[in-house]
Amino acid sequence: MPDAVMQAPMRLLQGATEYFPELIAAIGRARRTIYLESYLIHDDPPTREVLQALINARRRGVAVYLLLDGFGASTEMEWVRGLLLSSDVQVEFYRPRVKWRAPNTWRRLHRKLVMIDEQVGFVGGINLIGDYFDLAHGQLTRPRLDFAVMVTAIRPVIGMSRVMRRTWWRVSLRNAFRGSLGRLLTAERRQMELTMLREAWRRTRRHLRWRAPPARRQASRRARLLLRDNFRHRRDIERWYLLSIADAREDILIANAYFVPTLRFRQALMRAAGRGVRVRLLIQGQSDQWWTHWATQALVGELVSSGVEVYEYTESFLHAKVAVIDDALTVGSSNIDPFSLAFSLEANLMAEDAGLAAELRGRLEHVLASASRRLLPVTRHRGPIRALGRVMLLTIALMALRVFIAFSRSALRIR
């Protein structure tokens, strides 16, 4: 892939309308490998164009690996496999079963990542679904609001390569060996099973042997990939938010589709507003899940009363997970809610880039001015007993929400 593909190390993309053409063009220039991860996929014309680009790349000899969440994409497994496996595009599904009594199945692959030839990456909140379709509400009259970043900066690109390759070989081997013992004990299926396991091992050896290329000394440390998982990176994304909010001096602007923050997060925002920082929050105005909407409404009241400007996006559905804090920004897949911060594999790009931050801030401010309504403080006074009851009810509700999101099929499907 030519070095002059993109002059800027990072480029902001809004919605699938901007994202898919850039993704298809990058796939068209691929020469060696393409890795793509998504939580959702839907059979619509924009998504078909992306998949056709993957098929064309495979026909040119490019190794193509598509990893989808086994729950979010559960209803799409058959047509995806039928379309791609016949073209030798490798397709795997992350943990295809969710069981109430098996907590290890609650974790979901919520990342939206693409890596092409170890040179160009995409990270954001955009699934493989067009802007004008919603799984719960069908065809939309206005596009969904979401963002992604096209990145060539060496540090986040190496981070994407490492995590995507590692995840692929783990998932592919786990899927290949699932149920193998029982089939090996059956004489008539033993030889076929051994052949399948040998083929699975052959296809994953390259992932085990791969080593990240050495980072150039001039590689910028002002951009990096932040992950969330249940081991080494359990709180990395949340920690970045808290530290950045604590260091903010002028402006905090957060747009988040499912905003159900912890008490610590809310206190950080209120303290920032108290020391004179302008704090603005863009949340869902058209709710697609009543329980998250209710929890958000219950929580933002105290923020509004503390000087935080809270806006509801009313033009269409909000799916963005972005923030601009002074000259730093983050764009990715992580919501600020129990699902993302406790159960999901997430990925956000963090960058200290004044130009990119100004561009994202400008796009969000346009939305605030043209497609949102601001929430006003509640002037009704609550007595101490009612206030205490409200706190207790909210605490119980949030605890229930953390459990309910883990089990609710509809809650998992819309992210």
Image: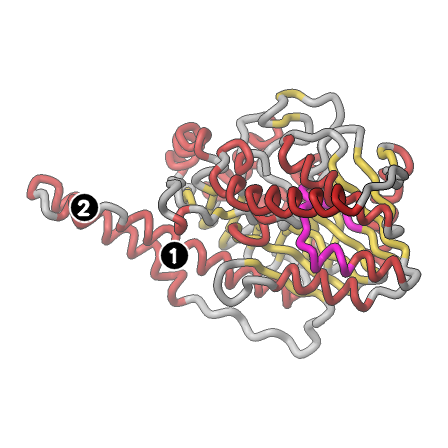
Q: Is residue 341 left or right of residue 264?
A: left
- Asked whether 248 falls inside the magenta stretch, the response is no
Q: Is residue 67 left or right of residue 294?
A: left
- Asked whether 255 falls inside the magenta stretch, the response is yes
Q: Residues within 10 Å of mark 1 (few under 14, many from 20)?
A: some
Query: Residue at the location (56% across, 58% down)?
Result: 228
Residue 246 occupies quadrant: bottom right
Q: Is residue 370 left or right of residue 68?
A: right
Kindly state the secondary structure of the residue where label 1 is placed: helix
Task: Give percent across and percent down for residue 260.
Answer: 67, 46
Q: Which residue is mark 1?
A: 170
Kindly state the secondary structure of the residue where label 2 is placed: helix
Task: Give percent across and percent down for residue 361.
Answer: 85, 50
Between marks 2 and 1, how big is the CA–CA gap? 19 Å
Query: Residue at the location (45% across, 29% down)?
Result: 75
- In the picture, the quarter occupied by the C terminus is top right
Vertical side of 121 occupied by 412: above or below? above
Q: Which residues are magenta?
A: 254-268
Residue 389 occupies quadrant: top right
Q: Is residue 260 visible?
A: yes
Coloring scheme of the render?
secondary structure
Q: Residues within 10 Å of mark 2 (few under 14, many from 20)?
A: some
Task: Give percent across and percent down for residue 26.
Answer: 62, 47
Closer to the chain start, of discs 2 and 1, is: 1
Q: Nearer the viewer, residue 184 or 406?
A: 406
Residue 193 - label? 2
Query: Residue at the location (77% across, 61% down)?
Result: 268
Task: Give percent across and percent down for residue 206.
Answer: 38, 61
Which residue type carries mark 2?
Answer: Glu
